[in-house]
Amino acid sequence: MKDIIKPKDDAEAIQMLHQFNEDLLPKKFGKIGVTWTIFLCLVIANGLFCYYKQLKFGLSVTGLGDQVSWGIYISNFVFFVAVSLVGSLITAVLYLLNVNWRSPLTRIAEVIAVACIVFAGLIIIVDMGRPDRILNMFIYGRIQSPIVWDVIVVMTYMTISVLLLYFPLLPGIAFCRDHLKNIPKWQKWMYKFLSFGWKWNPEQFKIVKRAITILSVLIIPVALSIHTVTSWLFATTFRPGWDSTNFGAYFVAGAFMVGAGAVIAAMYVLIKFYPRYDQYITDKHFDRMGKLLVLLSLVYMYFTVNEYMIPGYKMKGEEAAHLTELFVGKYALMFWSVQIFGMIIPIILLMFKKFRRPFPMFVIAICVIVGAWFKRFLIVIPTLLHPFLPMQEISESAKSYSPTYPEWSITFASLAGALLIITVFIRYFPIISIWEVAEERGIEHDVIYKHLNELNEKE
């Protein structure tokens, strides 16, 4: 297992900082990076075309109707909100607990959080059908409505997440400004504008660290609120499967689990396509993230058992019909696949050290992420097909729901959009923070300042 190498003296520390600069400053994409970006753009373009058709012809181009008015758009929204909580977990919770090994992972987590919360907001606008009426939410919205609560916490969480990404990034932007060569003028101007005159003095670092601490404290209750309020959108609706006092904790636990899975997947991709990154994201980080994922999965399993065992024990009325369809009916294959492959098997495998290595962890993380998306599908769709009031005098097509091609295209486009934000960020900004990695390796601040001043004098 590769371990963290700490410098013996200041000279070795400065040499290590030079190596950090060479390894971690953003680089131009190769053929794989360019191909990946083009692919994402094509998926987004197809989604935009389908959204144009939806704007032109209305929601009739989707499989939505009077019974299933929330389809995969809302499933996708809940998924994005869930993944976005990883920013508060890795950046805030582990930061406040002074867990040093989190340093190379914080920016990965925050970029994922920002990308996902942006598209969580956008997919809600898509689901509205009439985006021109979005202002009505702010003009005529009632504070008694959980939908208004959700709008408030989503916007608050997005704001804090952007700030929590930006403040620690300031030194990295300044590094790009001062030391990247042979870049276009617009890129130089971008770094100059975004760095806000960063001068590498100790007072600025103190301000940044103080801001990170304050934002880390603020984001934790907001993060808990965003997914709790999202769960209340369901739980306050009189539907079988949603009438649950367990939903808030259930949603939050599941969000932390899938968020950790997303960070693990990103870690593997980075060390796979950036050869030197495995010196910073080591086997130790995968091992500890694997242990963290086990803990989060066990917590989620506890709430999952609570969510289904008690209603399953009573099997009353429409709840019985809903659970029967999940356990042994139309959605049984999806339901049990999600529980087994998306939660139980990952827990069992990650108990063993040999599975807490990069590639096995990547495969397990993908299973967790895919399972989490389909879990949100199962929360939304089967419930809407089992209202408490019986469905009478309606067509057979209204008693089922099948997403149409435009729905799938727009959904995939939103996922591609989040991935494109992450991809573009990696291309133009350091995805691993140099100064935080230096701190993890025991390099004192005064050594960092000395090194940076030497570089500036040479430049």
Image (cartoon, helix red, strand yellow):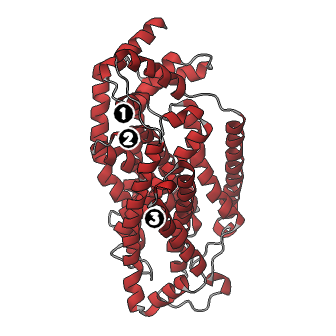
Nearer-N-terminus badge (3/1):
3
Three-letter residue code for mark 2: Trp
Give the SS element for disc 3: helix
Nearer-N-terminus badge (2/3):
2
Residue wearing tag 2: 101
Closer to the camera in the image, 257 or 447: 447
Give the SS element for disc 2: helix
Closer to the camera in the image, 299 or 54: 299
Give percent across and percent down for residue 443. Answer: 34, 25
Q: Tags 3 and 1 in contact by the CB under 8 Å rule? A: no
Q: Name above or below for residue 115 compared with residue 53.
A: above
Binning the other alpha carbons within 10 Å of mark 1 as few (below 14), some (14 to 19) or many (20 upward) gives some
Binning the other alpha carbons within 10 Å of mark 3 as few (below 14), some (14 to 19) or many (20 upward) gives many
Three-letter residue code for mark 3: Ile
Q: Tags 2 and 3 in contact by the CB under 8 Å rule? A: no
Residue drawn at the location 50% of the way across and 19% of the way down:
177
Q: Is residue 86 visible?
A: yes
Residue wearing tag 3: 347
Residue drawn at the location 68% of the way across and 59% of the way down:
409
Residue drawn at the location 61% of the way across and 91% of the way down:
393
Nearer-N-terminus badge (1/2):
2
Give the SS element for disc 1: helix
Three-letter residue code for mark 1: Glu
Closer to the camera in the image, 205 or 391: 205
Q: Is residue 377 visible?
A: no
Give percent across and percent down for residue 269. Answer: 58, 44
Label 3 – label 1 distance at C-alpha: 29 Å
Q: Tags 1 and 2 in contact by the CB under 8 Å rule? A: yes
Name the image quarter holding residue 204: top left
Residue wearing tag 1: 440
Label 2 – label 3 distance at C-alpha: 22 Å
